Amino acid sequence: MQQPRFKRIMLKVGGESLMGKREYGIDPQTTLEVAQRIKVIHDRGVEIAIVIGGGNIFRGLAASKQGLDRATGDYMGMLATVMNGLALQDALESIGIHTRLQSALQMPAVAESFIRRKALSHLRKGRVLILAAGTGVPYVTTDTGAALHSLELHCDVLMKATKVDGIYETDPIQDPKARRYKTLTFDDAIRLPGVQVMDTAALAMAQENDMPIMVFKLFEKDHLEQAIDGKDIGTYVSNQVKTVLAK
Ligand code: UDP
């Protein structure tokens, strides 16, 4: 079997990936499915850090539109990511993967606090590191947390799991004729109006610090593994590529 293209990855898993067919919350069976997909690349020796979102439970911005103080809502959103982190940890451990959950908000009864040097040590030891509470501060999202942590943990790539298999010209669910980008420059990822893949703050941080982003579909069979092998799936955003549509 070939060597994976990426040795250490930052995987951004949105909260909605744990929801299954529910409208809200966590579906244990779906969470187990996510864990099984992660196991495949873990078994191949890839070091994996995961930033988990909370959108299946709570988003500060949405709550602030209904009158809640934005910062309070954002802290509630961060707490939601801790719940998801616990669920994903449980699923991974149930299939024999050693994990550590670290939280950017201190919560010692359920998670280690985020300590960079400890986080690096967990990765070196082959533990799947789950990072909850994003950056630990309000007014940003877990995408920014993923960009930030990917840099400080020296990941080779930030892999963003999405519902569709890459970045399209426009939303392919609304417009079936939309074409997928094979590669995309950061400038285009930020500038093109139809492209909504990540917060601008996260994209700008990745661009400035040369962290490539791979967008792929988590629930497509073998997609994660193929992405790790550098196969032509998903969309690769980098300072080293030009914007090219897939054939
Ligand atoms: N959040 C925050 N700071 C962070 C990360 C998250 O305030 O560093 C809050 C914010 O309210 C966000 C919520 O937590 O909406 C859940 O995270 P996110 O929306 O990124 O989850 P996802 O869409 O990935 O499921």
Image (cartoon, rainbow, N blue to C red):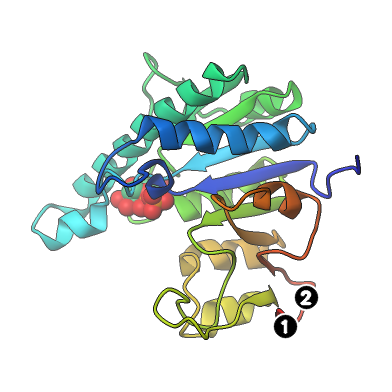
Name the residue beneath numbered marker 1. 244
Frontmost of labels 1 and 2 is 1
Q: Secondary structure at mark 1?
A: strand
Residue lying furthest right: 2
Q: Amino acid at mark 1?
A: Val
Quarter occupied by the C terminus: bottom right
User: CA–CA distance between discs 1 and 2?
Assistant: 8 Å
Instruction: Examine the rendering and report whether any part of residue 104 can be seen.
Output: no
Q: Amino acid at mark 2?
A: Val
Quarter occupied by the N terminus: top right
Residue pictured at 74% horizontal, 72% vertical: 239
Q: Secondary structure at mark 2?
A: loop
What's the mark number on residue 241?
Answer: 2
Residue lying furthest left: 67
Instruction: Please tell me in which quadrant of the rendered image residue 180 appears.
Output: bottom right
Choose between 34 and 74: the one closer to the eye.
34
Q: Answer above or below: position of 6 versus 83.
A: below
Residue pictured at 36% horizontal, 22% vertical: 107
The answer to whether the residue labelled 1 contacts the one labelled 2, judged by CB atoms less than 8 Å apart, is yes
Q: Answer above or below: position of 45 versus 245.
A: above
Q: Say whether residue 199 is left or right of residue 189.
A: left
Task: Give the percent coordinates (x, y) of residue 218.
Answer: 56, 50
Task: Give the percent coordinates (x, y) of residue 189.
Answer: 57, 76
Q: Say whether residue 2 is left or right of residue 110.
A: right
Task: Give the percent coordinates (x, y) of residue 111.
Answer: 44, 21
Badge 2: residue crowd in 10 Å (few <14, some 14–19, many ≥20): some
